[in-house]
Image (spheres, rainbow, N blue to C red):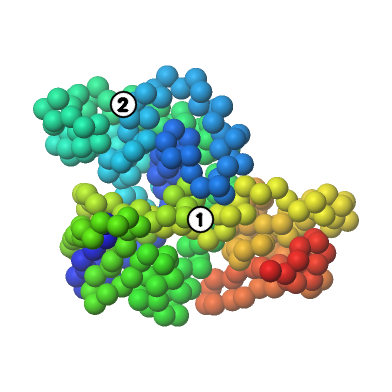
Amino acid sequence: MAVEIRFTAASVARVRFAVSPLGETVLALRILLGTGGHAVHQPWVRRARPLIADERELPLLRALVAGPMPSFLFPVPQERLPSIAMELEVLRATGELFFRREYGAVVGVPAEEVPEPAAVLPRLAQALHRCHELLIAPQWGRMQAVLDADVAKRALTLVDGGVQALFAELHRDIAWDGGQLVVHGRRTSHAVYTVDAGGHGLVLLPSIFNWPNVGVDKSPVAAASIRYPAVGVGLLWEPPPPALAGLAPVLGHTRAALLAALADPLTTAALAARLGITPSAVSQHLGALRGAGLVSTHRKGRTALHLRTERADHLLGISAP
């Protein structure tokens, strides 16, 4: 099935990016309880699955995430990086009619047989918070660094080439066509589902656990939204190169970790989040690595992206593709 998102001039002007901790929690649970996920996530899956074995709301979670998922699990963030608490408050406040329609469609019961929102939403929110603390919070520094780096990369594309170039780069299934955005499905059905962005705009959400797929909210309450696969997910769960064990005593653990992180372009802020140090400390270490020819920095406006050099790859024992 293809999804067409129709735009007005006002909605094009309101295209923005956001990151959703709640969305990543739900999609992580979908992998663990339903689809099994892409092979790239299997190192994480093996570690994470035992963590939720004792979750008392597993039947409820499985019913909502193992197959088609209700839109109320994915409230569109009102800011670029909301906290999990903020998103869960929005979830708890889901309107009754919307809840009944979405819950009934997913579970397969008429709206009049759907339980009261007050009997489900608080339990659901508490369970999602527990799962977030077990599955996402311990890895959030690394995950956020990947997501922030992706947003920085897309922002440069938007500055250089405009909205059309931005959409062309997001994913091969996404196409901008004369005032509407078309997201092509992988199934054989030729049906077309239309979403009207109206004047609310479009929110683009880079995702780790939806990788490598694209997801579209077909029932937006306000702004339309697309979840697309973030760049750099393929390396997120990989162990650091073996050479780092030998380099750390020479370069220092922080500089060795910086080199390991810079397989993909990252901003100073993203590196600071990933390593758990201050941006000023990152800048100092980058200066030393740059002076040694191990890191290069590319600037566009106020944004600086850092990447390790071929010399660094050689030092780490990584062959060019």
Q: Going by the image, does 136 lie left or right of 178? A: right
Q: Position of residue 136 (x, y in %)?
A: 52, 39
The quadrant holding residue 111 is top left
Q: Position of residue 125 (x, y in %)?
A: 35, 30
- Residue 216 to residue 126: above or below: below
- The residue closer to the viewer here, 84 or 66, is 66
Q: Seen from this angle, which residue lies furthest left? A: 112
**Viewer can see residue 93:** no
Q: Position of residue 48 (x, y in %)?
A: 56, 33
Q: Going by the image, does 101 lie left or right of 54? A: left
What amino acid does circle 1 point to?
Answer: Leu
**Viewer can see residue 117:** yes
> Under tag 2, what secondary structure?
helix
Is tag 1's residue or tag 2's residue first in the polypeptide sequence? Answer: 2
How far, Cα to Cα, is label 1 from label 2? 29 Å
Q: Residue at x 28, y 33 (%)?
A: 92
- Residue 130 to residue 275: above or below: above
| Residues tagged 1 and 2 counted as in contact (Cβ below 8 A) | no
Q: Quadrant of the C terminus?
A: bottom right
What amino acid does circle 2 point to?
Answer: Pro
Q: Going by the image, does 276 lie left or right of 34? A: right
Q: Residue at x 18, y 29 (%)?
A: 109
Total of numbered circles in the picture? Answer: 2
Q: Residue at x 32, y 62 (%)?
A: 184
Judging by the rendered image, the residue that carries numbered circle 1 is 147
Q: Position of residue 99 (x, y in %)?
A: 20, 35
Judging by the rendered image, the residue that carries numbered circle 2 is 122
> Under tag 1, what secondary structure?
helix
